[in-house]
Image (cartoon, rainbow, N blue to C red):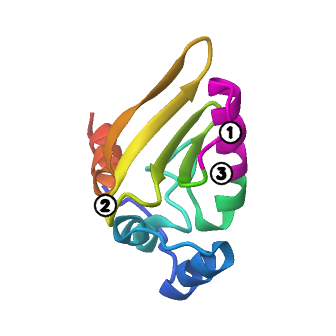
Amino acid sequence: MGLKCEGSTIESIEKEQNKRGIRLPKAYKDFLRVCGEGAAQLFCGDVIELRHLDYINDSGRETYEAAFGQKCPSNIFFILEHHGYSYCYFKLNDGDNPDLYLLVYGDEVTNELFGKIDHLLDYKIGLLKK
C-alpha cells in the first residue's frame, strides 16, 4: 500500500507534555511516534499532528461546550479534528490505553465510545482497504 507516515520524536513529545504539565498515555505517545508529524493518506481531512495540538484542543473544547452547554472537563484531551465538526478525545486520567471517544457536532450531537487509542491506526488502515 505504501502509506507515508512521519512520526514525532520522543523529545518533541516530552516537550509537549512539559509545556502542558501533563502525562500523555503510552498508547497515544506510540501513535505520535508513528504519525505525529503527518499521515495524509491515512488521515485525509483530519488534523492529528503534534504541532497542531493547541488548535485541536481549543477547537475541540469550544465544540464540546457548544454541544453540551457546559464547560469541557479539564481531563479531556482532544487528539483529532475533522473539518471543524468531528473530534476524537480521551480522558487523561484513564490509563495508558484510554478509551477514545468520538464527538460529532451538527444537527444532532454524537458523543460515543470509539474504541481504544491503539486501534485508531488499524481502523484507518481498514478504511483504506475497503
Q: Nearer the viewer, residue 38 or 86?
A: 86
Nearer the observer: mark 3 or 1; the answer is 1
Q: Which residue is mark 2?
A: 97
110 lies left or right of 85: left
Q: Disc 2 vs disc 1: which is toward the camera?
A: 1
The image quadrant that residue 115 belongs to is top left
Judging by the rendered image, the residue that carries numbered circle 1 is: 71
Secondary element at tag 1: loop
In the rendered image, residue 65 lying in the magenta stretch gets the answer: yes
Amino acid residing under circle 2: Asn
State yes or no: residue 74 in magenta.
no
Q: Nearer the viewer, mark 3 or mark 2?
A: 2
Tell which circle, 3 or 1, labels the residue nearer the N-terminal end. Answer: 3
Residue type highlighted by circle 1 = Lys
- State the extent of the magenta-drawn residues as a range: 57-73
Q: Residue furthest bottom?
A: 11
